[in-house]
Amino acid sequence: MTEDEPTLDDLADEKDVNDWLEMFWGSLLIVIGLNQLMHPGSLFAPATMQWLGSGVIALGIAWVGHGLKDMAVKEIRASLGVSSPTSKRIVDYGLIRDVLLHPDQYGKFLLEAYHRAYEDGVLTQDEHDELTLLSAALEIPPRQAARIATRAAINAAVDDGKVTTAELALIEGAMEVANLSEEECSKIREALEDGVIDDEEKKMLDEILGSFD
């Protein structure tokens, strides 16, 4: 990361202002919509005006919800330490941007978070709690989150070309939570024996745990 590259803290004020603006305008739309419901006026038929008011309220709620969601994601990222200027971890700004712009990429974001937690071969209770909060904030179902955790544990374990006993224990625990069948678990254990995931084994993992490329 170069000195000229913006940090997350450099962009924090702008993004926070945007979040507050979303909540402000959303609240204003809700007030306007409620007023329209109670005082439909005479421009169109009262029922039509009330329908329009309901639509304005729905739009306002969506804006407020989006602002709150962004704030929650930022708070969780901060608790994970990814926004700290003294952190030794490299923040993937492109990934964060993609997550905020493309909700379908939330799984990839959670995979990266689990991978960072598994890198040292130990998952602490604090890390587990933070990742659980993150998956809940991203609205990822527990079973899917467990499969993502399993894939992250596997990826972290094979990074150095060998799978230690501690790493295998993490993978076994993640597979149990993911409720994988014994056949699926056996295939994964067999793939990990040489500490390398080849193309066929990667395809097998994609079928069992999902692909996040």
Image (cartoon, rainbow, N blue to C red):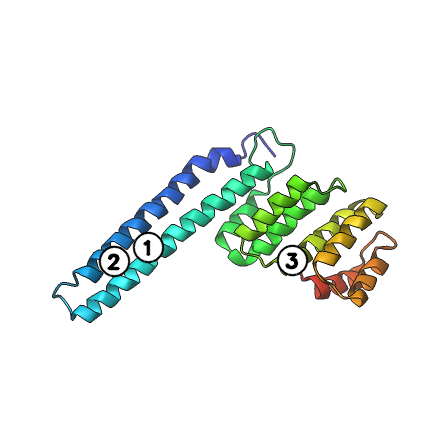
- Comparing 9 with 26, the one in front is 26
In-image side of 17 versus 196 (left or right): left
Residue 148 against residue 24 in the figure, above or below: below
Give the mark, 1 or 2, whose residue is nearer the N terminus.
2
Residue at horizontal 73 percent and vertical 50 percent from the top: 153
Q: Nearer the viewer, mark 3 or mark 2?
A: 2
Residue 197: x and y in percent read 80, 56
Q: Amino acid at mark 1?
A: Gly
Query: Looking at the image, do the residues carrying marks 1 and 2 touch, with CB atoms under 8 Å apart?
Result: yes
Q: Amino acid at mark 3?
A: Phe
Q: Is residue 164 visible?
A: no
Secondary structure type for disc 1: helix
Crowd tier of the residue under label 1, counting other residues whose Cα lies within 10 Å: few below 14, some 14–19, many 20 or above? many
Residue indicated by mark 1: 60
Residue indicated by mark 3: 212
- Comparing 96 with 40, the one in front is 40
Residue indicated by mark 2: 33
Residue 116 against residue 49 in the figure, above or below: above
Residue 70 against residue 90 in the figure, above or below: below
Give how far apart the Cα atoms at labels 3 and 2 are: 41 Å
Q: Extreme left residue here?
A: 42
Secondary structure type for disc 3: loop
Secondary structure type for disc 2: helix
Q: Extreme right residue here?
A: 194
Q: Amino acid at mark 2?
A: Gly
Give how far apart the Cα atoms at labels 1 and 3 are: 33 Å
Q: Quadrant of the N terminus?
A: top right
Quarter of the image for residue 53 reads bottom left
Residue 41: x and y in percent read 13, 63
Quarter of the image for residue 107 reads bottom right
Give the mark, 1 or 3, whose residue is nearer the N terminus.
1
Give the mark, 3 or 2, whose residue is nearer the N terminus.
2
